[in-house]
Image (tube, rainbow, N blue to C red):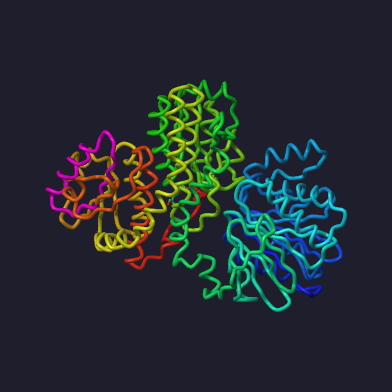
Amino acid sequence: MCGIIGIVSDAHSGAREILLNGLERLEYRGYDSAGVALVDESTAIYKTAGRVAALRRMVGASADAGTGIAHTRWATHGPPSETNSHPHKDCKGRVVVVHNGIIENFSTLKKALQDDGHQFVSQTDTEVFAHLFEDELAALDKVDLENATAAFRRTISKLDGQYAIVTSVAGLPGVLFAARSHAPLLAGLADGMTLFASDATAVVEHTKQVVYLEDGDLAVATPEGLHLFDIDGKTIERAPQTISWDIEDAQKGGYDHFMLKEIYDGPRAINDALAGRLFPTPPHVRLELGMDDARLRGIGRILILACGTSFHAGMVGKYVIEKLVGIPVEVAYSSEYRYGSEVREEPGLAVAISQSGETADTLAALREARSRGHTVLSVCNVVGSTIARESDGVLYIQSGPEIGVAATKSFLGQLCALYLLAFRLAEIQGTLPASDLRELERGLQHTSRLVDQVLQKSETIAEQAALIAKADSCFFLGRQVLYPIALEGALKLKEISYIHAEGYSGGELKHGPFALLTPDTPVVALLAPDGVYSKMASNIIEVKARGPQVFIVTTASDTEAEQLGDHVIRVPDTEAIFTPLTHAAALHLLSYHAAAARGCEIDKPRNLAKSVTVE
Ligand code: AGP
């Protein structure tokens, strides 16, 4: 997820401050590098790795223009660097472009353009657009507004994937082109000025009149106003809306907390983790693992290293990989594994899971695993992070910045990455019939809609959370692939509501923790249509007999839940293997509402940090 902003005005100055201030408002969307293009008779481009403040220092107070585009980046393709930061340009420097999203067919397009002699300077997908537009403009007899607009349409028609694009063409002063497909983009309408931006935060101080572009909309902006049209050039009418949010709200998209916004980003995080990785033709699962097929075929065991929520994702990965691939998977806390250097291990594949890519324990564990001969694959969110850079291969989850300390959308992205890894290994090692794999791939692609349906249950979940919020202690129970989700639910409740909570395998409670059960100790039990449903039901009956309130999370067609528990949260039916996604979404909401009911500081819980870069 990145932040983009553009302005076109009838002045010859003013754009610099509007663009830089707008980028600062958008930094919550991404902040690993930034850039700006000031467009007048000529185009001046300034780009840097680092935050917008570094860019502001680079630009200084001299350069200015009336038109420009700017970008603050969250890297998805190509690590954070000056070269990979936006704006990008074509070979001649006539086209400059900023982009938010993922152009899924960029590899194919880039190869064709390179075969035609185009020189690329970055590793980004975005740069492909600049060279495509260059070709379309070069084919024109005359570069005027009408012809350039048609060339822009033809260029956009070649892109697959998600994009919010804003671009300018030298020789066409006072004009910006824009397009939106599955990535947010709005236009701000002000006197003598038209802006584009990823969201209202960046424009609200200049205008409260905005037009929200829809998927498939293309636009031309001039100082006089905005013209919207579709890919065929047919004019589209969209009424301006008045922004009612203040700036702080706009950064949270109108949610009370970043954590809640990121929980509701869950379906998009699933789609983004799967984007460009599942195909209808072989190889059906395409991952940049840094290992060839022979190496993947020879993997006989896997070691997963992680901390906290990422450790819980690793535990789900264990169940899924062992079930689909049949190879043993060990999951170790990074902080424990790193101190076991006397252990001799058969070299295999170590998977380091880390949202931030900077967790000190996981970095140390990764280095320890490498010293024992393992190949290291990391599952990260932050492109170019230390753990990513020290790995042999990286599976980026592409979830965009996660601001809330409590990991939510990134957990769903990590699960998707591990499902994809399991599918790839099952395919290459031939452990599942192709038909079963295709069905699993389709099932995984469908889960974003299932999670969306879970999130629509927020009111029911909030009512139950209000009851849990009164407790001093709470248990979460799950079995098999839902045991890690019991641990995850307990961790979330602990870290944002400060209620003491424990996650247990359903069968374990009777081996001691039963002694803690009282009528005031709520128990959250997770059920799935799997081979241990009846065992889990028995555990719930045993628990109920000791008096606590039992809260059940189960699938829609479960017919016994009301008899088993006191409160039921139903998630949509899905294969048991995918219930970690649906049940985690429910528990993330449950912990959020419990913390809200207790008036806790949800985005920045006491004693915690988003990234634990110390031991
Ligand atoms: C999860 O909500 C916590 N923020 C914490 O447990 C976190 O998962 C852990 O510190 C690991 O962080 P990482 O994924 O960035 O390595």
- Viewer-nearest residue: 236 or 469: 236
Extent of the magenta region: 525-551
- Viewer-nearest residue: 109 or 532: 109
Residue 379: within the magenta?
no
Residue found at x 70% / y 79%: 191
Q: Position of residue 428 (x, y in %)?
A: 51, 24
Residue 51 in view here: no
Residue 542: within the magenta?
yes
221 horizontally vs 361: left or right: right
539 horizontally vs 402: left or right: left
Q: Is residue 93 above or below residue 414?
A: below
- Viewer-nearest residue: 559 or 333: 559
Residue 480 in view here: yes
View extreme (bottom): residue = 191
Q: Position of residue 392 (x, y in %)?
A: 59, 33
Numbered circles on residues, count = 0
View extreme (left): residue = 545
Q: Quadrant of the N terminus?
A: bottom right
Residue found at x 35% / y 38%: 575
